[in-house]
Image (cartoon, grey):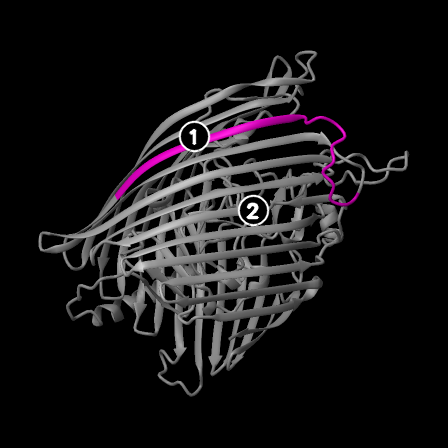
Amino acid sequence: MSNKIYTLLFCFFAFNVIISQTDSSHVLQEISITTYKEMNGIGRMNDFADGIIYAGKKNEVLQVDNLEANKAINNTRQIIGRIPGVNIIETEGGGFTANGIGFRGLNPYQSIETNTRQNGYGISADIFGYNEAYYLPPMEAVKNITFVRGASSLAFGPQIGGMINYELKDAANKPFEFSTSQTLGSFGLFNSYNSIGGTYKKIKYFGFIQYRNVDGWRKNSDQKQISGFGSFKYSPCKKLQIGIEYSLLRNKIHMPGGLTDSLFNADPKQSTRSRNWLQSPWNIISANITYKINENTSLSFKSSYLFSQRDLVWRNEDGGPQALDTITPGGTYVPREVEHEYFRSLTNELRFLTNYKLGGQKQTVSFGVRYANAYKKNQHGAEGTTGNDVDYTLTSPWGGQMNFYTSNIAVFAENIFRVSKRFSITPGIRYEYLSTIADGYDENEAGDSDDEYVKVKMQKNTRTFLLGGMGMQFNTSETTNFYANYCQSYRPITYGDLTPFGTVAKIDPKLKDASADNIDFGYRGSVKNILNFDVSFFYINYKNKIAIVEKTQDTVTYLFRTNVGSSEHKGVEAYIELNILDGLISTGRLGKLSVYNSFAYVDARYVTGEYAGNLVEYAPKYIERCGINYSLKGFSVNAQYSYNDVAYGDPSNTKFAADGLVGFIPSYSLVDVSASYKIKNYQFKFGVNNMTNAKYFTLRTAEYPGPGIIPSLGRMIYGGISATF
């Protein structure tokens, strides 16, 4: 299989080199670039935009409105599946719809290795201490999605897995516009999205409200959510814009729990838990100022404040999924466990970009500063009621209450040095100060004293990081270029790493932050309106990975959280799209027809430590998605085939465990079809996800939304209507 794929990639690569060279005989024009180029919904950022430099970096941009997909449930596989190598953790079958993503063999769970943003500011709880994304905007409200891979750390922060930014729609260029979208589907899906927006003199406004209800494909997986957004922008003059935004999420999620392998094989729709509930009310306020000093110079400032929480009441992971939650001989259920987490995070980012002349060429420099302060309070281990519905009433004291504090200051700079009209070099540097503190009390599970609770000694860790990088870009034509990039990044010790755990457990006092070196090399671009492509090679050296291992001392076995070793991730990412009708064949009478192929090969292995030679967990070797688009007048349809190779659920590469917490994750193949028809102001939509009703899963977990295997959804049919006035 791999030899055929590499041969195909080589043929496309050689074909494009020949065409692009014949198309590049004219002299490149020097223009001011402030946006991106795209074809059929996917494109790339230009050298710089919004105070950020993208030259020489692996990046993609998706125009969401141009994609046929099930946006009513944020079907990640359809919406961002064209991005090569994106590995998706599907948790809808566990009742939780904020799917996680990961690239290049990095951990995809809740996108913890990825810097997740909306309109340029962070929407995760705390990118340093608790980088989990419980909130994502509804895709019906999203205009563009921008991805930057390993080279993102200098401009956006240290995440090894890169950056993803959801850019929401903006105000219409008229005083008032109203849009509505209503969708019905399988498993009791009802989704209602409504927005207003407009421009009046110097004022722009936009807002939406979304309501979603799903009864669930599995038993006990029903959920309700309301999400909303409001934006107000004022431009006192052409050079200055001031804005404020507010995002909210309110949800009620019923979690059916996980399954063992035997339970999954018997019936993946069954549930071993009926009393597990999660709510994650999310609030983000953001203020922004953009000042265009002159044609060459701009200044921007973004400040965001996140005040959110996660509330959980559940029959916890004790005993695994095979320990059924049944009524006791006393006639009641056992008490559930209650947990509350509170997040407060303030982030400020100031960016400055200017173009200047040097050596007869226009050069571009961008620099800025970031200040962030975050607080998390975790209350856990309290007994709750024996009931079934959402009830956070406590029947015992908290088993533990921990407080976590994070302070971060960063300064960063990058400069595009254009050596000639075709070749540029972009060095960059980022200096970070990071301070983390953990204190509080927890249950005395070790039993080394008579105290029921023990004070946790305050742990403070202050350190600095100096990250460097270098990008290069050679333009073979106006629309094609070679690019290469080397960049350093790191993943700091998280709140969870500092939290006591287990019955007899220890934390390595010499625990170190993980770090990585990222390398990219590729060739990308477009040839007229015929071919769109990006073929690249990558390498990551991931050092000091943190994990839990078993140790024995004086016949006593205990769990030990430590740095287990290093891993190497290397492979190929390729996206190729060919316009057949209205491209290669110049005719518009038959409509537009295009085919695309998104492919990734990832070899991710531990190279040092106890697991040396093993495959990295959640790192399938092959991820393949190919599709076909056809449109004629107001009709449009997309069919996509997806394939994920096998993977393991833990570093020891366990193939089978009776409790289902670790083990093999089989390969799977899926087909999704979406279509729409637009007439005047109305659009009718219809689609089928997982058309073959494949039985598969992408996640094994020892905690929520498990424990055990979290099955992915079966066949889903949906339809709806949208209108804009």
Instruction: Give the number of the disc on residue 282.
Output: 2
Figure check: 282 above or below 508: below
Q: Nearer the viewer, residue 20 or 233?
A: 233
Q: Nearer the viewer, residue 677 or 199?
A: 199
- Could you tell me the amino acid type at mark 2? Trp
Does the rendering let one see residue 658? no
Q: Nearer the viewer, residue 33 or 405?
A: 405
- Residue 198: % across, % down: 44, 67
User: Of the residues under marks 2 and 1, which one precedes in the sequence?
Assistant: 2
- Residue 284: % across, % down: 50, 47
Callout 2 touching callout 1 (CB < 8 Å): no
- Residue 154: % across, % down: 32, 42
- Could you tell me the amino acid type at mark 1? Asp
Residue 22 in which image quadrant: bottom left
Give the residues drawn in magenta, as a range. 388-413
Q: Does the magenta run of residues contain 390? A: yes
Figure check: 375 above or below 49: above
Q: Is residue 269 left or right of residue 428?
A: right
Residue 715 in which image quadrant: bottom right
Does the rendering let one see residue 653? yes
Secondary structure of residue under mark 1: loop
Image point (52%, 64%), residue name: 140
Q: Nearer the viewer, mark 2 or mark 1?
A: 2
Instruction: Give the number of the disc on residue 513.
Output: 1
Q: Does the magenta run of residues contain 615? A: no
Instruction: Give the number of the disc on residue 461.
Output: none
